[in-house]
Image: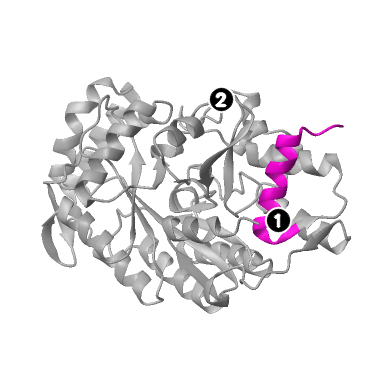
Amino acid sequence: MNVEKSKKEYVLDFLARIGFKDNGLSDKTIEFIFSYLAGIEELKTNRKYNDHNWEMNYASFDIKKNRYIPVIDYKIFNLYHKGLLKKIDRKENMWPQKKKFALCITHDIDHLFGKSFLYYRKMIPHFNKAPIKNKLLFLGSFIKNSLNIKKKSIPDLGIWLKAEEKHNFKSSFLFFSDKLIEPSWEDSFYKYTDKTIFEGQKVEIGCVIKEIFKRGWDVGLHGSCKSYCNSQYLKYEKKRLENLIDCEIKTIRQHHLMFDIRDTPQCQNAVNFKVDSTRGSNISPDFRCGTGFPFYQYDLNNEKSLDILQIPLVIQDNALFRHEKLNKEQVVNYVSEVMEMVADINGCMTILWHNNYYKNDKEFQAFEEILNKADKLGAWGCSLRELNDWWRRKRN
């Protein structure tokens, strides 16, 4: 098998950033690593779970059987022990402050009103295009929450910063644009002039976003449903958020993890995003890309590397609590086991916890316990922006 020069250079660059150089790798090994990073398996089908996201369920058995482990990372260290890779001598440690692994923490800000009446008032005008099943579910949710007076308050966005600050961690908060060119009924519809709760006070959302950014947390875009394959929409939404914080937005995750390996990387790259963290799963804690390490997206249409990092999403709250239906203890134990596995190889993993929880909810309590465990394991708790800045310095 002859591996094209561009593919080999692409894989060798990825290896160099992790700290290894070629010492006799076979073309088969190069092709194996390339296929995961570039998303070759994702090209084989147009199927999407709930019309949202490609899932590992659609992969071949050989790919699917390794979904829960960073198969590329393990392979790299096995190749090193076999003498087929050499370590690159560097003064710089793998992670800042000699930390054992990177835990990239992210929050998709889908809603900022809880299940209050304001939330339903914002959503109702857009549900005329929703399938009948979703309309009925929405109606049921409205009736249920109308009867549940205790849940009418708005979750406090400030609890996430406070939890992370205890460990000197930072995270990424990914917000919607307050206006969309072509909204979908599945998008979110908060305005930056609407008010939410932040640190016990009712504050305009725009002011909250600016304050989060001012304190050193990352503010990124949560791209709308129809933006994942439309650079014009992405450019518009990005500009709205940039105008608010008066700074360039570099990071993005698409809503519902909507991503097409054929088009999305090019669309994001075209409007100068530097980091995407969409390639993950809505239903399972997967290493979809075979690694948790960042890597540059590959343009399969033009066969070249793009200047946008993919930081793969490994675990999200909805997959564990809603789809796997795990309890708090099971979630904390599972995430802890994955962190231990990643820490053993000085690796990297990204987690997503949505913001729509109250301080006493099991989901938020699990998040706090996960941060405690991560700190004890020696994690560098970082945002997408921080990880991007660090990784780009690693070019050999």
Tell which of 15 and 53 is nearer to you. Answer: 15
SS of the residue at dot 1? helix
Q: CA distance from mark 2 to mark 1?
A: 27 Å
Q: Which residues are magenta?
A: 1-20
Name the spot of residue 164 as percent of width and height, x first: 37, 70
227 above or below 37? above
Instruction: Determine whether the residue tagged by mark 2 lies in a helix, strand or loop.
Output: loop
Residue named by callout 2? 47
Residue found 40% across the figure and 75% down from its top:
168
List the residue tagged with mark 1: 73
Q: Residue at x 81, y 44 (%)?
A: 29
Q: Quadrant of residue 178?
A: top left
Q: Residue at x 47, y 58 (%)?
A: 389
State the residue at coordinates (70%, 35%). 6
| Disc 1 residue type (three-letter) | Asp
**Label 2 crowd bin: few (<14), some (14–19), many (20+), radius 10 Å:** some
Query: Magenta region's main secondary structure?
Result: helix
